Amino acid sequence: FKGLGSSQGISAMKITVAGLGYVGTSMAILLARHNPVVALDVDPARVAAINAGRSPVADADCAAHLASGGLDLRATLDPAEAYAGADFVIIATPTNYDPATDAFDTSSVMAVIGQASRLAPRAVIVVKSTVPVGFTLAARAASGHDAILFSPEFLREGRALHDNLYPSRIVVGEKSARAEAFARLLQQGALNPDCPVLF
């Protein structure tokens, strides 16, 4: 699918990114090029790093973009501050695989969904964390929040921002206006905005 249109003329969206690992940090920087972004994390050192213009992860492109300024990005430890007025909430928290249970630990993702549902009830929640098949439908049912989408990331650790700026493709797990709006945000931040988009 191509032809979502130019990134010009897109209204700015208030975006919350939960989780400042390499996925969350790179997504926050990508989206903060054109939109106000508030990043939320439980680690004070990561929050302080973002607010000081330093990268909390080892990624040369993240470090360069944060150091150069010009991003509408700040970080906080306070969920109420992070979610206030959000149009989109992007979840990039860890879901480590546990070989003992043969399952991903999605508890951090569900915790963010619960917080976001309460504090930003009109926001579209986009899961970027690695989750099992069927997670999105189960999370909608468990939370009572219908606007939850999955959008897989195709990022290399240490090269995550580069891979977000030059995506090979953008995938959003729904065919809807809200899915198209999220894809446009990713295209807007990318330096190859005409990459294939799949819904």
Image (spheres, helix red, strand yellow):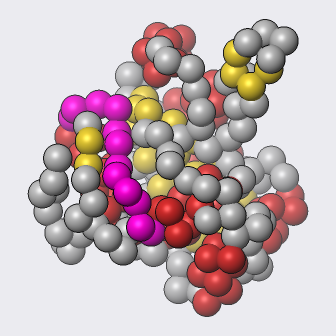
Q: Tell me if residue 169 is in the magenta stretch.
A: yes
Give the x, y percent position of residue 132. Answer: 56, 20
Q: Is residue 86 visible?
A: yes
Identify the image quadrant of the C terminus. Answer: top left
Is 131 situated above or below 100? below
Q: In the rendered view, does 113 fall on the left or right side of 169? A: right
Residue at x 53% of width, y 41% of height: 128
Give the x, y percent position of residue 91. Answer: 57, 41
Magenta span main SS: loop
> What residue occupies the far bottom of the structure in this picture?
68
Is 158 situated above or below 93? below
Residue 46 vs residue 15, the one in the foreground: 46
Asked where in the image residue 56 lies, by quadrant, the reply is: bottom right
Q: In the rendered view, does 143 fall on the left or right side of 66? A: left
Residue at x 59% of width, y 61% of height: 160
Q: Is residue 84 visible?
A: no
Residue 130 vs residue 30, the one in the foreground: 130
Residue 152 vs residue 143, the one in the foreground: 152
Q: Tell me if residue 121 is in the magenta stretch.
A: no
Q: What stretch of residues is rendered in magenta?
A: 165-176
Give the x, y percent position of residue 135. Answer: 51, 18
Is 117 situated above or below 52? above
Asked where in the image residue 66 lies, by quadrant, the reply is: bottom right
Is 10 situated above or below 198? below
